[in-house]
Amino acid sequence: MGLSLPSCIYLPLLGLCCCTFQGLTSPLRLDGDYTLAGLFPIHRSTISIRQKTTPEVDICESLPYQRLHSYHLIQAMRFAVEEINNSSRLLPNITLGYEIYDTCLPSATMYATLSVLSQAGDGCRGPRHVAVATNYTRYQPKAVAAIGPDNSQNALLTASLLGIIQMPEVSYEASSPTLSLKRIYPSFLRTIPSDRLQVHALVRLLKTFGWIWVAAVASDNNYGQQGLQMLREAVARLGICFAYQGLMPVDQDAGSAQPAQVVQGVVRSKANVAIVFANKRSALAFFQAVVRQNVTGKVWLGTEDWSLATEIWQIPGIRGVGTVMGMSVKQARLPGMEAFRGSEKATPCPDHGQAGACQHCRGRCSQPCSRFCRPESPEGSLDPSPYDMQGASNVYCAVFAVAHGLHHLLGCQMGVCRKGPVYPRQLLTEVKRVNFSIYDRQIYFDSHGDALADYDVVLWTWTELAWGYRVVGSFGANPAHLSIKEDELLWHTEANQIPVSVCSKECDAGEQKVPQGIYRCCFHCVGCSPGTFLNSSDPYTCQKCREDQWSPAGSQTCFERAVVFLAWDNHISLALLTATMLLLSLVAGTAAVFVRNLQTPVVKSAGGWLCFVMLGSLASASSSFFCYFGVPGRLACLLRSPLYNVNATVFLACMMARLFQIVIIFKMAARAPGLYAAWRRYHGPGVLIGTLTSLQGLIELIYLSTSPPVPYKNYDIFHDGVVLECSEGHRVLSYCGMIYNSLLGSVCFVVSYLGKDLPNSYSEAKCITFSLLIYFTSFISFSTAQAVYRGKFLGAICVAFQFSTLSGIFGSYFAPKVYVILFRPERNTNEQFQMSIQTYTKRIH
């Protein structure tokens, strides 16, 4: 695509000059085969950008703490370049050069970046320019890579511009997670971890000490706002609440109204722990306001940008604010750095009024600063603070990362590097792949260009008036884990107790948290009801136990329900089984006695062949008891009720047939002489028994085909047990068989009552009446027990009542006859029966 613009444009660049310091001078430019650009905040503006009403270029002013920190950063870059040039390990026949630029303001950062992108000019005698082209693959700026800048706001600007030609940019202090977006910032890398990792470390620290009611203060810039947003997202998943959230301006001092308002918000929140996610300039104003308002007794959690910053702990009165704990990037040791600083020679610097002074060359010079003087320390010492060493370490690692990239790009593995043009895109590819160690730190970049460095957890300590710090823990990035040395913690509390920062007192075990108001951290406690438990993963909801589990009130776990059924080896089961076997034995013995005395009057008067049908039905009904023991099976559930009901019907039908026959013989023989003959001729007993039994069989068949009983787990009887039983199926149909037998028994009882005055030899009606009384008593008793009791022994109760029914019928009807046959044979004769009939006939006439 063609361009209407000329092939290149010329941008006059403002000369970015360093300050003049009192002390030693050192060159801020070094010629070499390949040049690195260093972007450092040598000055700082004291004028707020928001106060500007017209476009103008700000003049950066020198601030002591700023230039001291920058001094160590610049020295780290110079030291790294000198080490590389003096060694044959990385670039044996290649020398690195550097140019240092001041990034004191965004406008200065813009000019510095354009200068880095420009192609080589002739310094002050000719303008530099940045060519506009459709393809920058073969574009060669004067620097092969950039080291810096120091903060995320400036880095967003430089990364956008340098990303156009994909020049490697390795920052040492810009930690915004936005810079990890490779689609927008393809050439940005950093030796400081992303703030996202620092947020994970801070949140884990809160969780470790149980601090869930926390205030959060952030600087009102990209660094603080993004950090606060990530904190909000992280704590929302862990049940941690922000009692207060405030933004600190980056351009106001502690005496202004806004810092005081933020401090008052922290105090009103009643949170004992506050996270200060701010840069050191905002943190300085904030803690000055904290000291001014005499806020004490809190835990202050800091980020790596200020937790070891000298200007913060030098605030008068800072010692009384409470406990200060923070994150610090784990530093690489630089053993030769001190010797390098000490090797510089002192020379006087030009004062501010001289024409050649670098600070006043604006408008006349377009080259980077050529003079740099050692700054004057407030305490007269140039020893770096831990904060300075942290930044210097990152600068050192950034320079070596570029050097390792050049090592691979220029083929230096064979001992000799090939000299030739280095294009930014090619170098970027190699720098992304580097993986090397510097002392005790491993340097490599992930897919987002971030270094996965570890953090130290540091705690401020005071020995009389001297400030110090100790490393009380660490946070590892791969894999993520936090470790704390609890025996080295020193708190501001009495007895060195861990400070508490909660909105509500923690609930007891098994009590759920019911939120009050808008914060989940403010709650009252309610115990979990039986059948529910409180899972540690969700303290706000009592969860129901599974159906096969149970729990008492206020439980934190569920227990397996005990399985309840009528076992074969249970004492009650053994008693019932023994009684059933005894009854079956008696039934079998009675059948044998009746077979041997089949032609005797007693057996004939008892019904003859009907006796064996009745005895068989008693035995079959008794066999249904075996279906009640053990774990219920499908066949046992199907046979249990029908087997008993049908055989009970057979027995009652036989009684009915026998009663009709007795009543016809003795009551209606004179009035209807042919009735008995018809009864015999048309097989009245068989027809009656078959009809009545068929009706019961039809009822049971409908019941089994419509809603058959199946093995069933009943969870409603016991809260801690599950009863294995058979389901009732259709409730009405399940009761129809018992109701039918009850009606049949009632009819039998009425007919038997009519024969109450029969001869003693024909006492079947009396025996049947007594048997039916036992039947009704057992039926009513069982129905009552079933209505009021549901439990493990319901099956045993059912067997007991049915057994009492069958044994009562057997004892009332068959036992007297067996007694006569075996022990009173003189009454088992035809003469005895004839005499009884004659006596009954005379009495009724």
Image (cartoon, grey):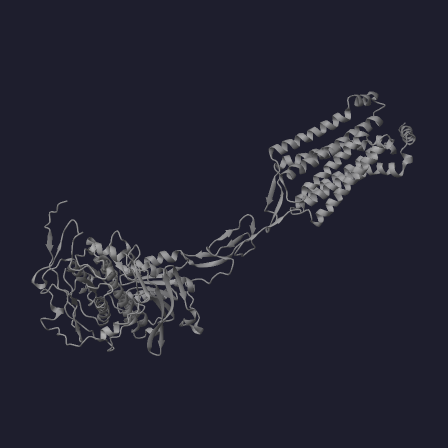
Q: Foreground residue, 209 or 733?
A: 209
Above or below residue 81? Residue 566 is above
Could one spot residue 666 in this view of the protein? yes
Could one spot residue 756 in this view of the protein? no
Residue 588 quadrant: top right
Identify the residue shown where x is 72% and y is 37%.
621
Q: Position of residue 608 (x, y in %)?
A: 82, 30
Q: Foreground residue, 834 or 426?
A: 426
Q: Could you tell me which quadrant the N terminus lies in? A: top left
Q: Foreground residue, 586 or 687?
A: 586
Q: Residue furthest left?
A: 125
Q: Could you tell me which quadrant the C terminus lies in? A: top right
Q: Position of residue 72 (x, y in %)?
A: 24, 70
Tally the marks.
0
Residue 258 quadrant: bottom left
Q: Position of residue 324 (x, y in %)?
A: 35, 69
Q: Position of residue 96 (x, y in %)?
A: 19, 64
Above or below residue 388? Residue 615 is above
Residue 180 quadrant: bottom left
Q: Residue furthest front?
A: 414
- Answer with left or right where residue 621 lies relative to residue 252: right
